[in-house]
Amino acid sequence: MSIVATIFELCAQFPWVIFILVMLVMKLVKKGHRAFGAAADMTTFLLLFSIPQLAKQFFDVDLGVLTWIVALILLMIMTTIEWRTKEELKFSGVLKRTWRIVFLLYSLIYIVLWGVQLFKP
């Protein structure tokens, strides 16, 4: 296995390490300005790969495409809500809000996967 694949696998298994590292670096570089947002954005991307990998490893269930489908459905719902409630649709704002909702949802799913695995008989 190549070193790149090993690094990617570790990042996908433990995205919170990347979250903490990005948060610390951003706090130092930008003096705390938007550190959480940058860390959450990068972690969301890793969680999109981490959830299927953990589900496959722990429970032998393939969720690969499903994680992306859920993110796209959330984006469509958020876009529709924005389109119905606002006069002008700003897609960058919708994308940012959706990305943060995906972060919260997939973080919860990640924690549940690890929790179920830890207490699995």
Image (cartoon, helix red, strand yellow):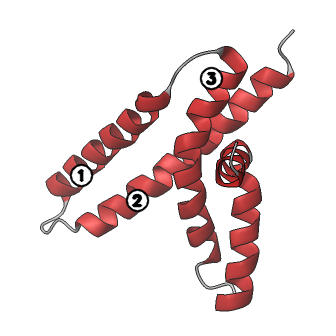
**What amino acid type is highlighted by mark number 2?**
Arg
Whether residue 31 is visible here, answered yes or no, is no
Q: Residue at x 71, y 42 (%)?
A: 13
Tag 3 residue: 56
Q: Say which element carries label 1.
A: helix
Along the horizontal axis of the image, is 55 left or right of 25? Answer: left
Residue 49 image point, x, y percent: 55, 42
Instruction: In the rendered structure, find residue 97 and report the number of the disc placed on it.
Output: 2
Q: Residue at x 63, y 70 (%)?
A: 36
Residue 20 image point, x, y percent: 76, 65
Tag 1 residue: 79
**What amino acid type is highlighted by mark number 1?**
Thr
**What amino acid type is highlighted by mark number 3?**
Lys
Question: Which quadrant of the figure has residue 105?
Answer: top right
* Image quarter (top left, top right, bottom left or bottom right) of the C terminus: top right
Image height check: is 105 above or below 120? below
